[in-house]
Structures are given as C-alpha cells and as structure tokens.
Amino acid sequence: MRRERENIVVEIEGKVAARFPVHLLGQVTCFGNAMCSPFMLGLCAENGVAVSFLTENGRYLSRMVGKTSGNVLLRKQQFRASENEGRAAQIAKAIVAGKVANQRTVLQRALRDHPEIESEGAIARVIDRLKSNLEFLDSTDDLDRIRGLEGDSANLYFSVFDRLILCQKGDFFFRGRNRRPPTDNVNALLSFAYTLLMLDCRSALESVGLDPQVGYLHADRPGRPSLALDLMEEFRPVIADRIALSMINRQQLKKSDFNKTESRAVLMQDDSRKKLINEYQEKKKAELTHPFLNEKMQTGLLFHIQALLLARHLRGDLDGYPPYVWR
C-alpha cells in the first residue's frame, strides 16, 4: 500500500488493485505480509485512520495510530472510575446486562424462526436462566459477582449454541468455546469475527479520547485492550455470533474453507477470511434504530455511539452507561 495524493493505493504484484480516498476510511486492517509505505502510514496518522497488523490467521500483532484524540481530563476520569470499585462495578454491570439481554434475544429469535431446534425444552430453560441472571445482576454491586454472572451466562448461552447450527452439522459443530488456537471450524470462525469486532471497538474508543487499555469488566493486564473487550461484549451475540451462524446456515462457508494444522489448530483460508470480512462490512451497512437515542443509523456507527455514551457518562453528563440492547 502506498500514498497517492489523498488516496491509499493498493498494489498486488505491481498492479493497482484498488484506490481509496483516505477521508472515507475508518481504519486499515492488514492481514499477513502486507507492506505499507511510510508516506501511506503518515497519511493515515494525519487523518486519524488507525492501521492494524494481524497475522494471516487473525492473531493481533500491532497497531499504529496518530495523535491521541480527546482530552486528558476525560482520560483522568476514566482512570479514576477504574480505581473506584463501586463505579467500575456499575459500568461493568451495565455492559453485562446488555450482553446477557442480547444473548437471550438471539436465542428467542432463533427459537421463534426455527421451532424445530428445540429439544426437551433445553433452549427455553437457558432463556429462563438468563432472565434470572439479569435479575441477580440488578441486585448486586459486587464486581466479582458481576463477573461471575457474566461467565455463567456465557456458559449457558454456549451450551445450546450448537442447536442454532441448522446444516452441515458434520463439519460445523460446537462443543464449547476454545481458542489460542481454535480447534474446530466454528471456533475458528468466531475467533476471527471477534477480532474484527475488537478492532472496531478499539478504534471507536480512541476516536472519542478514551484509553482502550483501561477497562471495568475485564481486569487490567499489560497489552490487553480491556476497555475494547468491555465494549465489544454487548455486540458479540448480535453481530459476530449471528454473522457466523448465518454464513454456516446459508452454506456460504464449507469444510474446505478451513485447514487443520499438525498441532490440531484450525485456521481459515484466505478466501474464507475475505468472505467473512465482506459479510461483516455488509452487516455494518444495515440500518437500525438505536434504542437509547431513538435515532436511525447504520450498524457500523454503533461502536462509536456506545463509546461516546460511555465518555458522556464518565464526564458526568449521563447518570449511567446505557448499553446497546437489541430489539
């Protein structure tokens, strides 16, 4: 990739494959051995376009950004809230409430559209237990308890996730979440979708001036984008999971789109990653009405809007953080 005036030009084997005006880009994500000219990187930095580098299989390597946006007062408020267990618990509780509510809705929609997937009331029981977890969540301000309810809800949700896979059951099955590396096709697909989601959430947080490293639900660790992981929780079920299920059930992906290494790790092939990226970008173009703002917008704007709402809460303009709840 190189700079040409105010455009980013993509060349493959010496031939121009694409040209993008930089003002139309939110970020650039490079998979594999992609080469970027210094002038192209400078153009991105000047225009607030982050450039992320990942391995060809989607493992995060590094990220280049320009000047930090926002102001130091907002970040100081963010840091103070993270060190105040009561405030951190309130923000974490809102994030988990949004995630669990969205998990319930995904299961309810699936059961409504495909009643044949129900067997012995398993999905209905999980839906009821997720509702109970929401009630327990509402009655606690203990951060460890909130994290425990998030983990329990994830286990419940994924215990019936395999039932949402409607076809190609021999090639696409889910026996539980595994990663680093994923050992089956579904987990490989989910891990890659979650990586795309995390990068968008990270960019959204940086764009409003928040530090993606300092979170509330996820504990701080060196190198971990804790706040980006927090923000993406409410989007996992309704964006990443639904895209993965849709691509399997519509047979947009097949067994041949995945490779298994000698170490038993399952990796997506180049073409299958492109399919997922295209599907993800199309999903971001879909219009919806934001439940808190009651305004129509593209799905891709949700990350920025939620980051903005979090920043407003930290500044004191909102009494609480309103998570995105899918309806």
Image (spheres, rainbow, N blue to C red):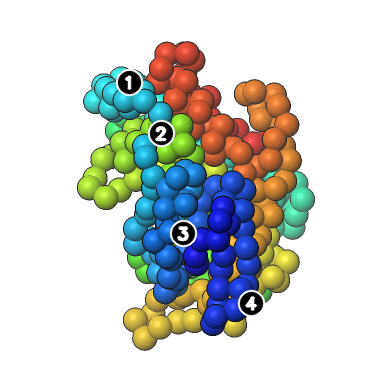
The kind of residue on which mark 1 rests is Leu
- Cα separation, mark 2 vs mark 4, equals 42 Å
Q: Secondary structure at mark 3?
A: helix
- Residue at mark 2: 69
The kind of residue on which mark 2 rests is Ser
- Residue at mark 1: 73
Give the residue displayed 27% in from the left and 50% down from the top: 223
Occupied quadrant, residue 41? bottom left
Query: Is the C-beta separation of discs 4 and 3 under 8 Å?
Result: no
The kind of residue on which mark 3 rests is Met
312 or 27, which lies in front?
27
Camera-near label (3 vs 2) is 3
- Cα separation, mark 3 vs mark 1, equals 32 Å
Instruction: Relative to 248, say whether 111 is above or below.
Output: above
First in sequence, mark 3 or 1: give its number: 3
The kind of residue on which mark 4 rests is Lys
First in sequence, mark 2 or 4: give its number: 2
- Cα separation, mark 2 vs mark 1, equals 12 Å
Give the residue displayed 44% in from the left and 25% down from the top: 311
- Residue at mark 3: 40
Q: x, y (%) of residue 284?
A: 65, 48
First in sequence, mark 4 or 1: give its number: 1
- Cα separation, mark 4 vs mark 1, equals 50 Å
Q: Quadrant of the C terminus?
A: top right
Camera-near label (3 vs 1) is 3
Camera-near label (2 vs 1) is 2
Callout 1 crowding tier (Cα within 10 Å): few <14, some 14–19, many ≥20: few
Give the residue displayed 42% in from the left and 74% down from the top: 33
Query: Is the C-beta separation of discs 4 and 1 under 8 Å?
Result: no
- Residue at mark 4: 254
Residue found at the far front of this picture: 5
- Cα separation, mark 4 vs mark 3, equals 36 Å
